[in-house]
Image (cartoon, rainbow, N blue to C red):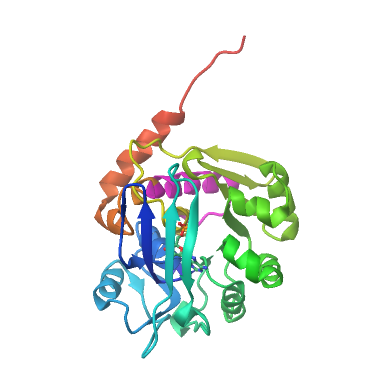
Amino acid sequence: MKLVTVGSVAFDAIETPFGKTDKIVGGAGTFISLSSSFFVKKQGIISVVGEDFPKQDLQEMEERGIDLKGLQVKEGEKTFFWSGKYHNDMNSRDTLVTELNVLEHFDPIVPEEYQGVPYLMLGNLSPQVQRTVIERMNVRPKLIALDTMNFWMDIAWEELLRTLSMVDVLIINDEEARQLTKEYALIRAAKKIKAMGPKYVIIKKGEHGALLFGEDNIFFAPALPLEEVFDPTGAGDTFAGGFMGYIAKTDEISFENMKRAVVAGSVLASFSVEKFGTQRLKEITVEDFNKRVQEFIKLTDFEINSI
Ligand code: AMP
C-alpha cells in the first residue's frame, strides 16, 4: 500500500446559483481518495461514519481499490454533516451548517496493513486527529501532506500549529493562507508557512489556479477555464488527492515532480466542479484525464523571442 488518506467522509447539502442538493455524499476523505484512485490501485482511508451512511457508496469506494479497514462505522450515530452556499462568483461560499456528529469524539485507528505506508495525506479534519494518525504510524511516512480550513483555525489554533510543524507539504487556499499568516501577499505567506514546518507549500486560488513553493522555487499552474462551474465543493480535496496520488504513483519527491503533481491535481479538480458532489469524478476515465492534460499543456505553452 502506497497511500493512506485521513479526512471526513460526510453528507453535504449544497446550494449554488445553479441548483440545490439534499444530503449527498461528500467529505474531504471521499473526494481525496476517489481522486487519488486514478493513480494508486490500492490505498487506505482513515475516517469515521455513522450507521446512516449508504453501504452502496462504501462498496463503490472499495471497487476503486480504497481499503476500508481504517473507516469506522459507528452504530447508533450520525455521519458528519456540512452545508454550504456559494456566492454568485462561485469562488466564495458561506458555511451554513457544520454538524460534527461522529467526528466529535473520533479516535482514529491505524490498521496493521497501513503501517509503513510511504505517503500520508491528512485531509480536512481536526488537527488533533491528524496529529494522532502521524503519532500512531510506527514509521514516519516519507512524505506527509496536510490540508485544513478556516473552521479549524478558528477553534483549534494551537493544535493546528503543532500538527503543521510535523508535516512536509501544506495544501491550503489563498484566504486560509492569509488567515494563517496574517500576510496578504502570498509569497510572504508561503515564506511564513515554511518557517512553521512544511518544506513545500501549495496555495490554491480557486478558478485562478495554484501556486507551488519549495526549494527556493515557485511554480504556477492555472485552473482550466471552464464554461460552466456547477459545484466547486471538493475541488480542493480532489486537487489534493490528485497531487498525492501522482506523487505516490511516481514515487519521486522533488520540486520538478511536484509541478507535474500540481497539474494532475488541477486536471482532476477541473472535472470535479462540473457536476454536484463526487458524480463527475466517478464518471471520468483515464482517457478523459489524459485528454485534459493535453489541454493544460496547450493552454500554458508559448514561445517568445527576446528583444
Ligand atoms: P473543499 O470544497 O475542498 O473545501 O471541501 C469540501 C468538503 O469538506 C465537503 O465535502 C465537506 O464535507 C468537508 N468539510 C467541510 N467542513 C469540514 C470540517 N470542518 N472538517 C472536515 N471536513 C469538512
Q: Is residue 227 left or right of residue 187?
A: left
Find residue 136 and report its horizontal and vertical position in percent.
58, 82
Front in this rendered view, residue 80 or 296: 80
Residue at x 53% of width, y 16% of height? 304
Find residue 269 and report its horizontal and vertical position in percent.
40, 49
Q: Residue furthest bottom?
A: 76
Is most of the magenta stretch helix, strand or loop? helix
How many numbered circles are shown?
0
Residue at x 36% of width, y 35% of height? 294
Find residue 198 and report its horizontal and vertical position in percent.
67, 58
Q: Vertically, is 62 above or below 259?
A: below
Residue stretch rendered in magenta on the structure: 249-269
Residue at x 74% of width, y 52% of height? 192
Q: Is residue 257 magenta?
A: yes
Q: Is residue 187 left or right of residue 174?
A: right
Q: Vertically, is 65 above or below 302?
A: below
Find residue 131 and report its horizontal and vertical position in percent.
61, 75
Residue at x 47% of width, y 77% of height? 114
Q: Is residue 238 visible?
A: no
Front in this rendered view, residue 251 or 259: 259
Q: Quadrant of the N terminus?
A: bottom left
Q: Is residue 189 left or right of residue 302?
A: right
Residue 169 appears in which quarter of the rendering?
Answer: bottom right
